[in-house]
Amino acid sequence: MLEFASILLYLLISFGLAFLILGLSFLAAVQKPDLEKLSAYECGFDPFEDARDRFDIQFYLVAILFIIFDLEVTFLFPWAVTLNQQGFFGFWSMMLFLIILTIGFIYEWVNGALDWQ
């Protein structure tokens, strides 16, 4: 159980810092709610239109790409914590994983999936 202490400490510090920053910003900010601020916000789309209107698929594509490349971090953190026990095979397995992700990222970049019009 001791090997998970560093992960638990990381999580405690992360959540503590997040709640501290959120609390301080709530206390320090001037609270002036109006109708515009209290309205629903939907990723830059005008919230006053019909919700059944069609919109660009680019939003979904960027969101899915973000999730795919963000999942990389979920594999990197435990790998980095146990890197000294992984040895040669563990290190190069992760390097192969990162190379495949980098090739995918370059492919999406070249095809213009990350360009926002």
Image (spheres, rainbow, N blue to C red):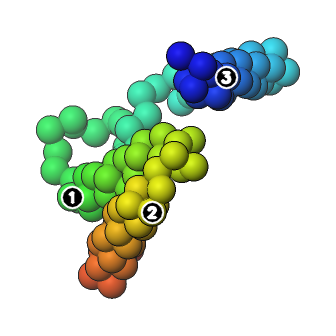
Residue positioned 81% across, 15% down in the render: 27
Give the alpha-carbon distance from disc 2 to disc 3, as whole Å: 28 Å
Q: Residue tagged by mark 1?
A: 57
Q: Where 53 sits versus 50, above or below?
A: below
Q: Residue tagged by mark 3?
A: 9
In the image, taking residue 8 as reference, residue 103 lies left or right, namely left
**Label 2 is placed on what type of residue?**
Phe
Q: Residue tagged by mark 2?
A: 88
The 10 Å Cα crowd at callout 2, few under 14, some 14 to 19, many 20 or more, is: few
The 10 Å Cα crowd at callout 1, few under 14, some 14 to 19, many 20 or more, is: few
Name the secondary structure under disc 3: helix
The residue nearer to you, when weighing 110 against 33, is 110
Q: Nearer the viewer, mark 1 or mark 3?
A: 3
In this view of the protein, can residue 11 be seen by the observer? no
Name the secondary structure under disc 2: helix
Give the alpha-carbon distance from disc 1 to disc 3, as whole Å: 40 Å
Q: How many marks?
A: 3
Nearest to N terminus: mark 1 or mark 2 = 1
Give the alpha-carbon distance from disc 1 to disc 2, as whole Å: 42 Å
Q: Where 52 sits versus 106, above or below?
A: above
The residue nearer to you, when weighing 58 against 70, is 70
Percent of width and height locating residue 94: 40, 60
The 10 Å Cα crowd at callout 3, few under 14, some 14 to 19, many 20 or more, is: few
Nearest to N terminus: mark 1 or mark 3 = 3
In this view of the protein, can residue 67 be seen by the observer? yes
